[in-house]
Amino acid sequence: MKVIRNILNSRFSKNGDFFVKMQDILGFSPKNIDFYERAFTHSSLQKKDQSGNNLNYERLEFLGDAILGAVVAAYLFKKLPDSDEGELTQMRSKIVNRQTLNQLGEELNLLAFLQKENTNIGLGTDICGNLFEALIGAIYMDKGYGACQKFIHKKVISNYLDIERLEGKIMSYKSFLIEWCQKEKKSFQFINCEDLGKEETKHFSVELKIAGKTIAKARSTSKKKAEEKAAKRAYFALQNKIEP
């Protein structure tokens, strides 16, 4: 094995160590390492090919997202023959969500491979999930759909797909509470409040009222996140009255 790695390192003298690390993550030898290097190239480097096209992970992320959704959808289609379109869509969303993708990217330590202009560039909270999708896109370009399918089954479906657990998982507490209020004929209102926090980043405060009574309050960096956080707090406050 050591001899083989030495051969690979000499063949890819510029990125031999990267090749070996990718091989360990993927479970197979990359055919064209360039795709994987692109999957970990940030747009801040402004790399371009001979035709002037951008060379970064964003297009591969788009491709990987589509392939990941297709593989999971095909699995669920076969696994849940009695589920209708809406149920399958909800189940897929519960599996292919940012939290899971970010966790997968973190477990594989993908951020360590990212090449960018400098350490001060903001990467966002979903960077690990984005890199995981870009990696899937690179696998597709390098090895095709079959290799992607095997990788996704090994890394995602085998480790994160528990049908019984996911069937009871709430993806959006806001949507769930709105549906529950409508079913129970209860009025609800998300009220935007003045945020008096001293953070440099602007925050939004929200108060959630159900049937005229304040059930929860929350604040976050966007109205959408604040409303979701308030809805989640309200769900747990009313948990003895509602069920998912």
Image (cartoon, grey):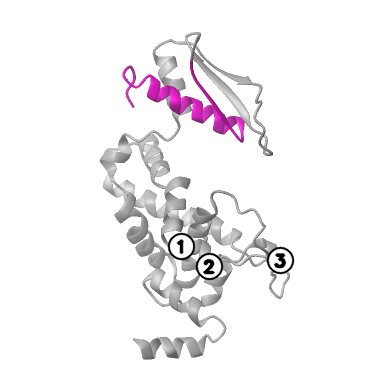
- Towards the viewer: 111 or 36: 111
Residue type beneath disc 3: Gln
Q: Which residue is mark 3?
A: 46
Residue type beneath disc 2: Phe
Magenta stretch: give its range.
215-244
Label 1 sits on a secondary structure element that is loop
Q: Nearer the viewer, mark 3 or mark 1?
A: 1
**Residue 25 image point, x, y percent:** 40, 69
Residue type beneath disc 1: Asn
User: Mark 1–mark 2 contact, CB under 8 Å?
Assistant: yes
Which residue is painted at 38% across and 49% down in the image?
73
- Residue 155 appears left or right of 18: left
Q: Is residue 42 above or below residue 201?
A: below
- Residue 152 appears left or right of 37: left
User: Mark 3–mark 1 contact, CB under 8 Å?
Assistant: no
The first of marks 3 and 1 along the sequence is 3
Q: Which residue is mark 2?
A: 113
- Within 10 Å of disc 1 (Cα), the crowding (few <14, some 14-19, many 20+) is some
**Residue 35 image point, x, y percent:** 54, 71
Q: CA distance from mark 1 to mark 2?
A: 8 Å
User: Which residue sits furthest front?
Assistant: 198
Can the viewer see residue 81 in this picture?
no
